[in-house]
Image: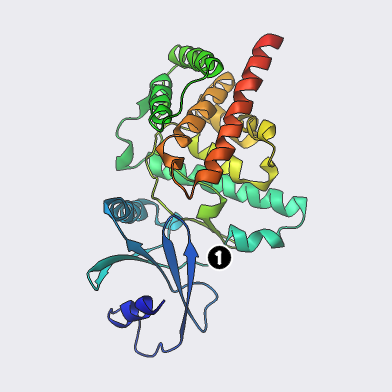
Amino acid sequence: MNFIKSFLSTTDLLPNNFSKLSIACISTTRPIYLIFTESDDYPMYVIRKISDDHDLHSSNIHKKIYQLAGNFLPEPVGIYIHEGKKYDVQRGVKGVPWFQLKAKIRSKNAREQLEKRIWKTLREFQHTISQSEYNIIKKIQPHEELKKARLAYLSTGETLSGQLKIILERAIDDLKYSTTCPSIPQHGDFCLNNLIIDTNHITVIDFEDFLITKMPLYDHFSLALSLPSCGNEPAKRANVFSHSSIVTSANALSIHEELIRWHFLHHLLLRLGPWSNSVKRAPYRASLKRILDSFIKQQFINSYEK
């Protein structure tokens, strides 16, 4: 932590009268440093090291999105150089991350009310982003997006089982003969871990995967799979596309209810591409594979019953 103290002392970030600070570190795909003062129960600053071009791109994306949807994001302060290394600095926001809050959500009613607030935040955030410069093309062809997800899946060395091939062919045909759907830039990892939850407001963080796709409902599936109400059983998680909030959003976007499952298949294949092909995401990748296997089995069972 000493280098963070040294970094702060050489910048204009702190007034002279701030002598007592505490620093916490959260280890995710890259370390996040939280700077606290004595008087505040939320961070004054959040600092991330910029290690490569992708980190720098994410920082620039955050700044641009803040300009049009600032109410949803932490305020970017700037990029600072210290001892030849770059650091991205954002202001802290009121609220706590999910891992600190979940122990306090004890009743079913409290959980349901919180989930309603989160779904509302997602809808409002996406509505704002869909009006931005990131969405010049207003319509996409969902069957082509599914083909791209298939390529991403195969690029990691995965292969297509016979059943998955059949399901993909059916999905592509169904989507091909449907109408085009709205193009909506996706956060890329809209889940409980990337939300700061306060009593009256929810802040969205971590835009490292922003624009991974413009396929609508991608963020909806990420969120649904992260909710405690989704459960841990692969068979239940494989049916998450029938979640009432997802169906409602699909209807609002004129996506036929029978096609939502193919949007979910797109989500699974894209997540099982390079996005999850790292050591830190290995446990999540294994979970996604189990969900995909259950999803495939369910589709075959449903086809047989029909």
Q: Is residue 58 above or below residue 284?
A: below
In front of the other: 222 or 217 = 222
Q: Position of residue 143 (x, y in %)?
A: 42, 19
User: Is residue 248 shown to the viewer in this render?
Assistant: no
Residue in view at x 44 percent, y 57 percent: 71
Q: Could you classify mark 1 by the number of other residues whose Cα lies within 10 Å: few (under 14), some (14-19), or many (20 or more)? A: many
Quarter holding the C terminus?
Answer: top right
Q: Is residue 22 above or below residue 106?
A: below
Describe residue 55's horizontal placement relative to residue 33 as left or right: left
Residue in view at x 55 percent, y 43 percent: 284
Describe residue 48's horizontal placement relative to residue 93 as left or right: left
Q: Is residue 232 above or below residue 17?
A: above
Q: Quadrant of residue 55?
A: bottom left
Disc 1: which residue: 95
Describe residue 137's horizontal placement relative to residue 170 as left or right: left
Q: Position of residue 145 (x, y in %)?
A: 40, 25
Q: Secondary structure at mark 1?
A: loop
Residue in view at x 37 percent, y 76 percent: 4
In front of the other: 126 or 175 = 175
Q: Residue furthest right?
A: 107
Q: Position of residue 162 (x, y in %)?
A: 53, 15
In front of the other: 290 or 68 = 290
Q: Position of residue 152 (x, y in %)?
A: 39, 30
- How is the model colour-coded? rainbow
Residue in view at x 30 percent, y 59 percent: 51
Q: Quadrant of residue 302?
A: top right
